[in-house]
Amino acid sequence: MAKFKGAIVVNTERCKGCDLCVVACPTETLALSNDANSKGYNFSFMEKEENCTGCAACAHVCPDACITVYRIKI
Amino acid sequence: MSSIQDIVDPANLVYEKTTVMNDTPMHYCPGCSHGVVHKILGEIIQEMGIQEKTIGVAPVGCAVFAYKYLDIDWQQAAHGRAPAVATAIKRLLPDRYVFTYQGDGDLAAIGTAETIHACSRGENIAIIYINNGIYGMTGGQMAPTTLPGMKSTTSPNGRDQQLEGHALDMSKLLVQLDGVCYVTRQSVHTVGAVRKTKKAIRKALENSMLNKGTSIVEVVSTCNSGWRMSPADSNTWMEENMFPVYGLGDLKDI
């Protein structure tokens, strides 16, 4: 099992729903929301929260720097 | 099991947006490589602690508004003239980290002369060169760097080499100049590539203080709007089509 558990916080207003974080996520945690922000973009969110290991891959590839990553050891 | 609320705590922070980058929403299209390069540039400046000592020269092109997003000193140059402007800034203020941030339309088309002569003189500046193979800002027209057979709005049947010439590989050209100390070609499509690009840009900025000559970091990037693809598809297209022509790696490092 994973030794780390992570969580991300997406700045939903800044997110443009480009999908790159969803593709980059190695644990298939992320997905694009059905909700849209004020600009009409479907922002990304943690669909499967339990999968997140806090690897920060999503944050590194995010072109708009919308993702903050947290991680704890378990 | 820990709940999300327990994990989201400043003590457990792994990654957050660099403070050098401000909160102004970027005008770039969703998935644009420019955003990633801006972000890693901000991270490097924060890590090196040189926010007060860095001067960027913004180009004409999509990155024309770079000065709105990174809180460092900026100078806007006329189209293609960024290396000439950076030359003056670096010569007048030699204790500053001076870099230019240019696209392929700026650096490889209208600014070819400025680029080549700044590199030939060995100016102690870093050149960050974003190569996406088209003119992105004006609507995806053919650029000198457009790949053979690549479709653009001004080459709708693909670039014909007989008629429109070959793809211009600026890095390969600049490698031969004695004034150049570091030429590398990177990309930002995966986490690994982002890390490598970050290392390369950091090295280029450090070189600018060592009186070694000009450093060039070419970032092969995507323009999903101009290429008429989704961001994820354009990354795949770039890997399959751009990388065979613009191969990644260090071309010169002395």
Image: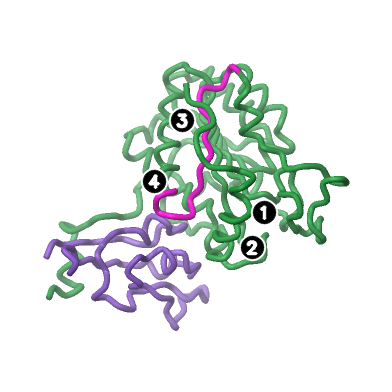
Marks 4 and 2: CB-CB under 8 Å?
no
Residue at image mark 1:
B136
Q: Which element type, helix, strand or loop, lies under badge 1?
A: loop
Using residue B38 as the reference point, say whether residue B1 is left or right of it. Answer: left
What residue is shown at x 54% (from left), y 43% (from top)? B219
The disc placed on residue B225 is: 2
- In the rendered image of this protein, which colour is used for chain A? purple
| Callout 4 secondary element | helix
Q: Is residue B62 left or right of residue B199?
A: right
- Give above or below for B28 relative to B63: below
Chain ID, mark 4: B
Query: Residue B175 appears at what percent x and percent y?
Result: 60, 26
Residue B204 tag number: 3
Q: Chain of mark 1?
A: B
Secondary structure of the residue carrying numbered label 3 = helix
Looking at the image, residue B207 lies above or below residue A38: above
Q: Which amino acid, by three-letter code, is at mark 3?
A: Ala
Inspect the magenta stretch and tell me whether residue B192 lies in it. Answer: yes
